[in-house]
Image (spheres, grey):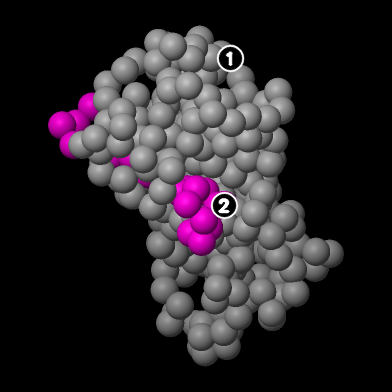
Amino acid sequence: MSDMPIITILTDYGIIDSYVAEIKGAILKITPDATIIDVSHDVNNYDIAEGAFHMARSVPYFPDGSVHVGVVDPGVGSSRKGIIIKTSKGYLVGPDNGLLAPAAERLGVEAVYEIKYSDLLPPKVSEVFDGRDVFGPTGALLAKGIPPEEIGPEIDEYIRLPAYELKITDDSVEASVIHVDGFGNMVTSVTYEVLEKLGITDSGKFMVTVAGREFPLPYVRRFSAVAKGELLLLVAGGGYMEFAVNQGNAHEKLGFGAGEKVSFKLMK
């Protein structure tokens, strides 16, 4: 771990209440030299899929060895596990409800641990505030250099989000819309790596099947590659391919949104 550990936090807590500050306080009690980065605290309440998207989008841009704490946890207080996912680039900490999986898989999963041993953690104050009492302190311990096996046993499985599971053939991919951004761009679970497997490194054309419709769309590298108001596919800043309209709103134009299944077949 680096001399100045980085810990990121993503929650659905908002910033009106003191919840986020309490997590940061718990972290700094254990690792006072940590640099704490807020990814977002404006995730819609209980929206695991939205939180997972923002985590997956952001984690590749942090230095190796960073620790990422995610808390969107509608099952808090239940039998759901708290987990640590060790990746080739750092750690992810949070509830085992799918929140961490897309981000961890972008980084490369190496091992998963259940947060089980409480000896190193502070006394648990509440059964319904694991962000402060469990996940924040666990992240701080990892950032301090404590091995994950001292916090809990290695386990074989973790919960994944079905929307990120792809079916890939030589010339097609079945995916899902995972997010609609503020511009109306509809982000899919298709990444650069998937496009490379299909043989696309620059531009191409897909026959798209979605919501009972089939239509061709160009895959391009910039919005201006098509005329104003025209539909396109491109990989934007987050690393995922998305439906977009040059200076327009794809969500309004196409009329479907997050959760929709979509098929892309490469056109020769």
Residue type for callout 2: Asp
Q: Which is more foreground, mark 1 or mark 2? A: 2
Image position of 33 with respect to 40: above or below = above
Query: Foreground: 255 or 53?
Result: 53
**Magenta region includes residue 248:** no
Q: Quadrant of the C terminus?
A: bottom right
Q: Do the numbered discs 1 and 2 sit on residues whose CB atoms are within 8 Å? A: no
Left or right position of 8 against 214: left
Residue extending farthest left: 3
**Residue 156: numbered disc:** 1
Q: Residue at x 45, y 77 (%)?
A: 223
Q: Earlier in the sequence, mark 1 or mark 2?
A: 2
Q: Quadrant of residue 148?
A: top left
Q: Residue at x 21, y 36 (%)?
A: 33
Residue extending farthest right: 212
The span shown in magenta is 1-20
**Residue 116: numbered disc:** none
Q: Residue at x 61, y 66 (%)?
A: 180
Q: Residue at x 70, y 23 (%)?
A: 79
Q: Which residue is mark 2?
A: 12
Q: Which secondary structure, mark 1?
A: loop
Q: Quadrant of residue 92?
A: top left
Q: Position of residue 229 (x, y in %)?
A: 57, 88
Q: Position of residue 193 (x, y in %)?
A: 45, 45
Residue extending farthest bottom: 228
Residue 17 appears in the picture as rendered: yes
Image position of 177 with respect to 124: above or below = below
Residue type for callout 1: Asp
Q: Which secondary structure, mark 2?
A: loop
